[in-house]
Image (cartoon, rainbow, N blue to C red):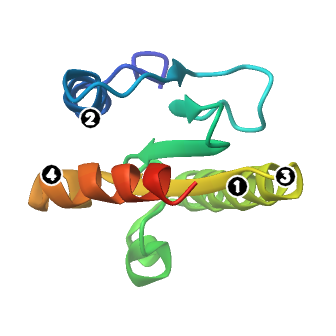
Amino acid sequence: MANVKLHDGPLEMAIRSELHGRGYRFRKHVKSLPGRPDLVFPKAKLSVFIDGDFWHGYRLPCWEYKLSDFWRNKLRENRKRDRRNFRRLRVLGWRVIRIWQHQIENDFEYCISKIINALMAA
């Protein structure tokens, strides 16, 4: 697990590069916010998380039976932590967008549009 990159992965870099190329400016991995969002747009109070399907347990109940107890518990705790951080951000007045790995791989433009639409709605 020590070799797993926590941020700046290829999907996150692709999203950041595209948004930056379109003129959007943001902060990365803001330590003062719950969960250290991958992208933060302070003026719009928008936080964006780019989450890997496995590590954040996308549809975990459908496939957790295949995992050892260690991994099942690890991913359940990851999901709890994510829910807790999203709640904390909302209480602080932030809007939260979560983009999953499979969404980026299947429809990159939709993911970019989702962020831009949220920024324009602010």
Three-letter code, disc 3? Arg
Q: Earlier in the sequence, mark 1 or mark 3?
A: 1
Q: Earlier in the sequence, mark 4 or mark 1?
A: 1
Q: Are marks 2 and 1 in contact (CB under 8 Å)?
A: no
Foreground mark, 4 or 1?
A: 4
Crowdedness of circle 3 by 10 Å Cα count: few (<14), some, many (20+)?
some
Q: Are marks 3 and 2 in contact (CB under 8 Å)?
A: no
Q: Earlier in the sequence, mark 4 or mark 2?
A: 2
Q: CA distance from mark 1 to mark 3?
A: 16 Å
Q: Position of residue 15 (x, y in %)?
A: 26, 35
Q: Is residue 43 placed above or below 97 in the rendered structure?
A: above
**According to the image, label 2 marks what residue?**
15
Most distant residue in the bottom direction: 62
Q: Is residue 85 placed above or below 90 in the rendered structure?
A: above
**According to the image, label 1 marks what residue?**
77
Q: CA distance from mark 2 to mark 1?
A: 26 Å
Q: Position of residue 63 (x, y in %)?
A: 38, 76
Q: Earlier in the sequence, mark 2 or mark 1?
A: 2
Three-letter code, disc 4? Phe
Say whether residue 61 is visible.
Answer: yes
Q: Quadrant of the C terminus?
A: bottom right
**According to the image, label 3 marks what residue?**
88
Q: Secondary structure at mark 2?
A: helix
| Front in this rendered view, residue 74 or 48 | 48
Q: Residue at x 57, y 32 (%)?
A: 40
Three-letter code, disc 1? Glu
Crowdedness of circle 4 by 10 Å Cα count: few (<14), some, many (20+)?
some
Q: Quadrant of residue 79?
A: bottom right
Q: Is residue 95 left or right of residue 5?
A: right
**According to the image, label 4 marks what residue?**
108
Q: Secondary structure at mark 3?
A: helix
